[in-house]
Image (cartoon, rainbow, N blue to C red):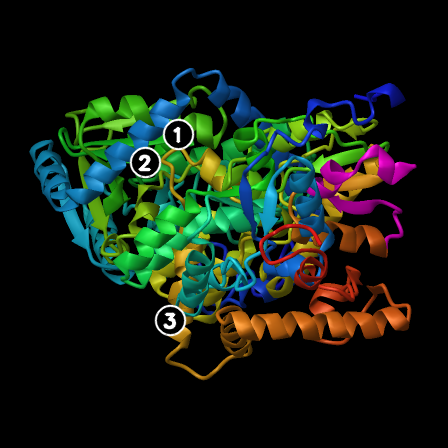
Amino acid sequence: MASTPAQRGAGPATTADVGARITVALFATCANDVMFPQAPMATTRLLERLGCRVVFPTKQTCCGQPLVNTGYYDQSVPIVRNFAETFGGYDYIVAPSGSCVGAIRHQHAMLADYAKDPGLRRDVDAVTSRTFDISEFLVDVLEVTDVGAYFPHVVTFHPTCHSLRVTHVGDKPNRLLAAVGGITVRELTDADRCCGFGGTFALKNPDISVAMASDKARHVADTGAEYLVAGDNLCLLNISGVLNRQKAGIKPIHLVEVLASTAADHE
Amino acid sequence: MSKRPVRPSNAHDADRLTPAPPPGRFLDSPTFPKQSKVELGNAVQRRNLYDAMRTIRTKRVGVTSEADDWEDLRLAGEAIKNRTLRHLDRYLLQLEESLTAAGSTVHWARDAEEANAIIVGLVNAALATPQGDQASAREVVKVKSMATQEIDMNEALEEAGIAAWETDLAELIVQLGHDRPSHILVPAIHRNRSEVRQIFLDEMGRYGRPAPDDLDSEPVNLAAAARLHLREKFLRAKVAISGANFAVAETGTLVVVESEGNGRMCLTLADTLISVVGIEKVIPSVADLEVFLQLLPRSSTAERMNPYTSFWTGPTDGDGPQATHVVLIDNGRTKVLADPVGRDALRCIRCSACINICPVYEKVGGHAYGSVYPGPIGAVLTPQLRGVASAVDASVPYASTLCGACVDVCPVRIPLPDLLVHMRHKVVEAKAHGRPHADDVAMRVTGKVLGSPGVWAATTKAISGTGAVLKKGRVDHFGPLPWPLSLWTNARDVPAPPNESFRAWYARTHHKDGSPR
């Protein structure tokens, strides 16, 4: 997996023609916007490096998942409507979150039907079919796995439940990581087991959530990695919450931040 | 139900025929979050579940991945169940006709109370029939059955002066332990062998043949003690009570799938056999068993085939029970069927694959769910069968991280996370008619903020403002904080928010058209 210095930045994707002339509407997600801006910043930098134009529609808020998954359908319908209106005019909507993209694809249509609004359902269907997690957009739309990244660290990867089982990103994140220069990826035991976050579950059932996060943190620590990589910052928040409390010395980092890193960042 | 010592203080009520279960009704159980705190502290259960669930999960992957047509089987299982449920009225009448033609007597029960009244009446009638010149012992032997657990039949029989003996080994451990099942397939999974040994030594002698004095905790010796204890009950009992995994409409055949053979002892040795069957157990034809007898054992015990599969189609002259009764129970199922989303849960064949893979169940076990049905399927089925009026039933739909691991293993493709969210919505709807609740206020405010782009933009500024103040104070992480933040920070740190939101960074570094400044 390790690359030589000669390979740094030598990937085909360092040229800006991979994503030439594609305009991407970035859905930062609400949590990233205020708590983890590094992920949408990295998404912007990476996509621009690959030749895309990245726009940020400022009317965006949230995917609605915190409300839907707590059972508050009526309160989430305006959020769904806002998403469809805000992103309706774009060909590609990209978010650095498997979970938020999963919620958009899997729940927005249901909520439009719940609102008994066929117009909204039509708009939702149009916009959700063009919404991608960053790993899907890179591999499926831009057709690139080597994005010219360089990250000379030992990492382990937590695939996150919704990325795997709702958004179905499959092994795309793993393929993207494997192509990063300088990186060492260590296998994580029970990688596909949930970290215990689960949105409001983490607050409604905090003790179970922590018991689950502790298993995950133990497996992460056992890999000897410096960084824990995942495609969802809220899962990272949960696991690193435990790791940080334990002074484990393992840093959480979003997949897209690794992919946006270049040799220049490490000189 | 909050604590389960090996022998609770109420254990030996002199007036009782069978070991008393823990006091209290399921409906009055503590909420899931409350009871789960107790369960998390049960070290034996934690260890047993961590090991056993991992073993069975790994085995399941082996026996399902070796079947080339596994995904086709799942699709077929889903389709057969959907078809049957869509025409349930027709298939049930056909089942009644076939059962009757085969010589069985069919009884219909709207709810648990009606079912128990019918069963008590049938047992009383069967025991009243003279058996030579000796009165029959007022007892029945039981095949492991979730339906009878659901209607709390053992206690109804106890009240009528009839002892119901569990004969499945794990159910026997649970019964003798004055306990409740904690899993639908392995109901004593929360016990270890030395606890089982102690339960056998303390209790077997009070209810039949005692365990040998020198009983140790070797599994083979524990099983031998159970075998001897149960044998006298098998040979003596005139009435057996079973459930059924499948009821075939075309032929009136009932099917029981089991591992130990104790079920078959009950099914063949008694004079009268009463089978308690949920109305969703009907399948159209014997040919459909080709699908389900592959799906069930591989998903359940993770075996290619289970050791004992019994079929019976009414009584057979001079062989086995001479009277066969079937009590078809609704007990909330038609209510579930009326919900176009929730009805998917009726496809369940009680395999336990969703329970075995559930990371939440693995931490707390079955007793936290306030129902005989734990895990993801319990969290969607029980609140549908019983409604969400009780505190425990309103709490179990939230007993999941929605990680979705259960969806991939369900042999009849029940979309469990979708149903969990659906049931959460039902809980919110029910709450809307009650007093305002902290949750409710928080969610309504969140809805207002995220539903309005302007308010959200202002909120991002406020959060970054806080971040900037914290940054000046060189705070980048928080340790323990007061309630309600303590719900997160009791065991987890949380980073301070950054002093610049993404949208502020973007506006600073980019033009509106997306070109970098």
- The stretch in magenta equals A246-267
Image location of residue A209, percent across then percent down: 66, 55
The residue identified by callout 3 is: B429
The residue identified by callout 2 is: B245
Q: What amino acid is at disc 2? A: Asn
The residue identified by callout 1 is: B296
Cβ atoms under marks 2 and 1 closer than 8 Å:
yes
| Quadrant of image for the N terminus of chain B | bottom right
Image location of residue A251, percent across then percent down: 83, 46
Q: Earlier in the sequence, mark 2 or mark 1?
A: 2
Q: Say which of A40 and B318 sits in front.
A: A40
The answer to whether dots 3 and 2 both sit on one chain is yes
**Which quadrant of the figure has residue B312?**
top left
Q: What amino acid is at disc 1? A: Leu
Secondary structure of residue under mark 3: helix
Q: CA distance from mark 1 to mark 3?
A: 35 Å
Secondary structure of residue under mark 1: helix
Q: What amino acid is at disc 3? A: Glu
Look at discs 2 and 1 and give the one toward the viewer: 1
Q: Say which of B439 and A155 sits in front.
A: A155
Image location of residue B447, percent across then percent down: 50, 71
The answer to whether dots 1 and 3 both sit on one chain is yes
Q: Earlier in the sequence, mark 1 or mark 3?
A: 1
Q: Label 1 lies in what chain?
A: B
Is residue B264 visible in the rendered structure shown here? no
Q: Residues within 10 Å of mark 1 (few under 14, many from 20)?
A: many
